[in-house]
Image (spheres, rainbow, N blue to C red):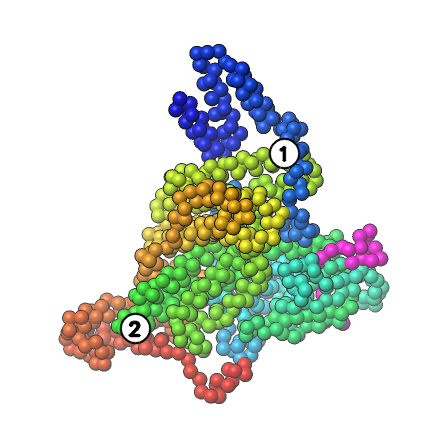
């Protein structure tokens, strides 16, 4: 009797766990009926009734034509009103780009072997040489003090970046550009960002969403031949004008307009567009010569066809044309990159000014979203990673150099805690930057993943730099050549705001796009319902049901068994994290199903819930990037504390996000059911322990090789320059004299030497504790310690000059 009950249950659970939902019903049912008819008595009427019902179920569920006729057509009528209604703008954004690892995560069964096997093209020898030479030289040309004083890069820096192709990093070689990969673009942005934000923005903007990228993808041959060589050489300075007062995130509210009409162009009557616009926050607009303009195209006289409202369109506008106004500047928190408004009044351009020509009229929003999917993966993630790595480099030196109560502040637990956050966050951030850039270089246009890295890496930069400022205290807030963190701190809100403010990105874009685009079946269901395609709807719906039951089973079984049923693709310290992430992915997918199923089309207005679902999806990806980085770099034991800290943080964030969704579902019964399935043993993931934090902090500060690898790719100033260069010199001096200084400490503890530094080293030589040569080495280290904790001060005239700048 027990076997009769337990065996079918085990069969059902096993088949559901394996993703065989249909057979999970059929096989146990067949076993029960077979076992029943084996009894000593002839089968009863009840047996035949139940068998008949089972047969009908199998026929309906297992044969799609029958299922569609008897079940699905009724479900289609019932469910169609429940799907969200999308505007054309939303649909275009949704369909832009590609899905990649995010789609794996949305299945609840990520294929870790596929992720670990993935490798981007990497940097070519030519790209690496450019980083080592031209990028290095450009950084040396740029002086932050001069930029702040004059409000722009020097003429020499501008000339160099134009002459060496920095304006054409993404422009193909055939048009005179560098033709570099996404990985190279990311590496260049990261390096220049680590030195100066004004320089970084100046380099990144021409090489992200704008005229060059749009022309390369959509331009006519004539447009490419004319404009791309000029852009590559810096003969044209581009800007892209999208944002305006009433239309930041909501492009559908755009008021900039273009009316198709005839007018005079170069002395001839020409079919073209009369443009009017008022844009703001446009980087490089103050000096731009070529404006990429987004506007709504109207054709009231039907000169192009039957449509009056043609939609959002992108065109190229020469800023020297009558009616164009550029030159004014905004002041973005005192950071001196060129950013400002632009207006145009009755500006006439010929029809061939549309990027892509007449055929691309009305296709502007699709063009922008498609390119943004790739570009958003590069610029701001590079800036954020640079800020984190620069902070890691600075505070790891500063906390070793700065002593209180006779020992480096890095050894105080109160400092170890923020140090661990700085180092751990930096580790996952650069892993995410590299993986995402590699995916773009491999041909992906990851719309959801690009939104994730933009939002969560700029937030990560905020956390890292804030912790660095807290540690450095007065040295962090006293501006001047010695200050390493103030510039990054000043620029934090800019990265958080641009290319989709993080609040909007988190609450509307990531899960709003991900739930439909990355889900294996949701978009197919929506499109089939919209077009009344019964066959497509039937296939997607029943696969969807199978996915839900499978992930419900997987989540609860993995949770109850402590992830034993979630095998890891690799042994070692990362194994348990692979298993946890597999369970959390299944829990995420099931939680998302509960939210989508219970809230339907109203979910997109429940932004606190979608924000938490975005958190879960984001940390699943960021955790994946962390695991891949660890494995790609050889799973070194020295890196294990960093990987573990980052993974424990990611796992806790995913757990807390899912718990928050389940706690706040309007249908409380579903919330309770979800908690049993997703968190059957409760919230067991606690994040990094105190011991882990101490381990991480001590590892990076004591291991010079690890510190170097953690900050690989940033610009390192000469050792004689105040700021990061001098901090590096001081760090090396203290590391080199660690043994000698240890001898002195031991002698002080033994009472052989005084605690005061006055005459200390001379006495140490007299007593044979140090040699004369060793005394000189230790004196250099002591001098560096004293010098490098000093802050900048200015006389009255110099200070007033700084204020006026």
- Tell me if residue 29 comes above or below residue 511 in the rendering: above
Q: Nearer the viewer, residue 159 or 770?
A: 770
State the image quarter where residue 792 is shown.
bottom left
Q: Is residue 435 left or right of residue 229?
A: left
Q: Please tell me which residue is depicted at 63% across the width and 34% down the height of the picture.
A: 538
- Tell me if residue 354 comes above or below residue 108 in the rendering: below
- Residue labelled with disc 1: 538
Q: Nearer the viewer, residue 79 or 247?
A: 79
Residue 311 drawn in magenta: yes
Q: Element at badge 2?
A: strand
Q: Is residue 331 visible?
A: yes
Q: Quadrant of the C terminus?
A: bottom right
Residue 665 picture location, percent across and down? 53, 48
Q: Please tell me which residue is depicted at 20% across the width and 71% down the height of the picture.
A: 744
Tell me which segment is drawn in magenta. Answer: 298-322
Q: Quadrant of the N terminus?
A: top left
Residue 313 picture location, percent across and down? 72, 58
- Residue labelled with disc 2: 404
Q: Element at badge 1?
A: helix
Q: Please tell me which residue is depicted at 70% across the width and 61% down the height of the picture.
A: 254
Which comes sooner in the sequence, label 2 or label 1? 2
Residue 101 picture location, percent across and down? 52, 46
């Amino acid at each position: 009797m027990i076997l009769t009950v337990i065996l079918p249950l085990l069969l059902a659970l096993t088949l559901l766990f394996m993703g065989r939902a249909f057979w999970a019903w059929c096989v146990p049912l067949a076993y029960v009926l077979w076992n029943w008819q084996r009894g000593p008595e002839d089968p009863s009427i009840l047996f035949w009734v139940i068998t008949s019902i089972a047969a009908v179920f199998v026929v309906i569920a297992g044969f799609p034509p029958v299922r569609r006729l008897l079940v699905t057509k009724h479900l289609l009528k019932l469910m169609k009103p429940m799907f969200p209604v999308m505007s054309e703008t939303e649909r275009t954004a949704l369909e832009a780009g590609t899905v990649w690892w995010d789609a794996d995560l949305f299945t609840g069964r990520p294929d870790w072997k596929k992720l670990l096997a993935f490798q981007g093209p990497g940097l070519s020898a030519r790209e690496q040489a450019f980083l080592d030479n031209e990028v290095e030289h450009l950084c040396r040309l740029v002086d932050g003090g001069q930029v702040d004083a004059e409000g722009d890069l020097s003429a020499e820096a501008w000339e160099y970046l134009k002459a060496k192709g920095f304006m054409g990093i993404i422009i193909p070689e055939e048009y005179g550009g560098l033709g570099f990969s996404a990985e190279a673009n990311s590496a260049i942005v990261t390096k220049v960002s680590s030195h100066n934000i004004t320089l970084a923005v100046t380099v990144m903007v021409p090489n992200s969403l704008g005229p060059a990228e749009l022309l390369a993808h959509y331009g006519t041959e004539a447009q490419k031949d004319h404009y791309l060589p000029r852009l590559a050489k810096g003969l044209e300075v581009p800007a892209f004008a999208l944002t305006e007062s009433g239309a930041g995130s909501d492009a559908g509210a755009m008021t900039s307009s273009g009316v198709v009409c005839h007018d005079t162009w170069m002395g001839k009557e020409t079919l073209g567009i009369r443009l009017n616009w008022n844009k703001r926050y446009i980087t490089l607009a103050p000096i731009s010569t070529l404006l990429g303009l987004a506007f709504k195209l109207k054709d009231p006289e039907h000169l192009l066809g039957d449509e009056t409202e043609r939609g959002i369109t992108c065109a190229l506008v020469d800023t020297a044309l009558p009616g164009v106004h550029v030159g004014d500047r905004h002041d973005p928190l005192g950071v001196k990159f060129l950013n400002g408004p632009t207006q145009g009044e009755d500006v006439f351009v010929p029809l061939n000014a549309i990027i892509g020509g007449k055929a691309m009229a009305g296709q502007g929003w699709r063009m922008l979203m498609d390119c943004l999917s790739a570009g958003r993966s590069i610029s701001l993630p590079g800036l954020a990673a640079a800020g984190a790595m620069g902070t890691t480099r600075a505070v790891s030196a500063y906390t070793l150099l700065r002593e209180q109560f006779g020992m480096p502040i890095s050894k105080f637990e109160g400092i170890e805690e923020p140090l661990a956050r700085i180092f751990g966050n930096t580790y996952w951030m650069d892993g995410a930057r590299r993986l995402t850039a590699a995916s773009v270089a491999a041909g992906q246009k990851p719309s959801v993943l690009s939104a994730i890295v933009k939002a969560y890496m700029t937030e990560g930069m905020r956390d890292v730099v804030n912790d660095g400022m807290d540690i450095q205290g007065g040295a962090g807030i006293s501006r001047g050549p010695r200050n390493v963190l103030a510039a990054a701190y000043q620029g934090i809100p800019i990265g958080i705001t641009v290319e989709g403010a993080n609040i909007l990105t988190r609450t509307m874009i990531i899960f709003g796009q991900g739930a439909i685009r990355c889900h294996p079946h949701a978009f197919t269901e929506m499109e089939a319902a919209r077009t009344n395609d019964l066959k497509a709807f039937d296939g997607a719906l029943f696969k969807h049901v199978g996915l839900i039951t499978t992930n419900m089973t997987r989540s609860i079984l993995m949770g109850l068994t402590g992830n034993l049923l979630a095998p890891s693709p690799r042994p070692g310290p990362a194994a348990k994290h692979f298993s946890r992430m597999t369970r959390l992915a299944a829990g995420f997918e099931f939680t998302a199903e509960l939210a989508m199923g219970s809230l339907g089309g109203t979910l997109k207005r429940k932004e606190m819930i979608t924000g938490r679902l975005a958190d879960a999806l984001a940390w699943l990806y960021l955790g994946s990037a962390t695991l891949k980085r660890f494995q790609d770099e050889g799973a070194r034991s020295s890196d294990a504390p960093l990987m573990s800290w980052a993974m424990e943080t990611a796992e806790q964030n995913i757990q807390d996000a899912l718990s928050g969704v389940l706690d706040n579902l309007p249908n409380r019964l579903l919330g309770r059911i979800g908690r049993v399935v997703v968190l059957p043993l409760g919230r067991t993931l606690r994040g990094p322990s105190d011991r882990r934090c101490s381990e991480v902090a001590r590892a990076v500060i004591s291991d010079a090789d690890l510190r170097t690898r953690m900050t690989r790719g940033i610009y390192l100033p000469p050792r004689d320059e105040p700021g990061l260069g001098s901090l590096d010199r001081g760090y090396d001096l203290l590391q080199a004299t660690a043994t000698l200084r240890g001898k002195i400490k031991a002698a002080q503890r033994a009472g052989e030497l005084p605690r005061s530094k006055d005459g200390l080293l001379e006495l140490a030589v007299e007593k044979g504790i140090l040699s004369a040569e060793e005394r000189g080495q230790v004196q250099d280290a002591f001098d560096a310690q004293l010098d490098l904790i000093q802050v900048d001060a200015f006389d009255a005239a110099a200070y007033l000059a700084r204020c006026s700048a």
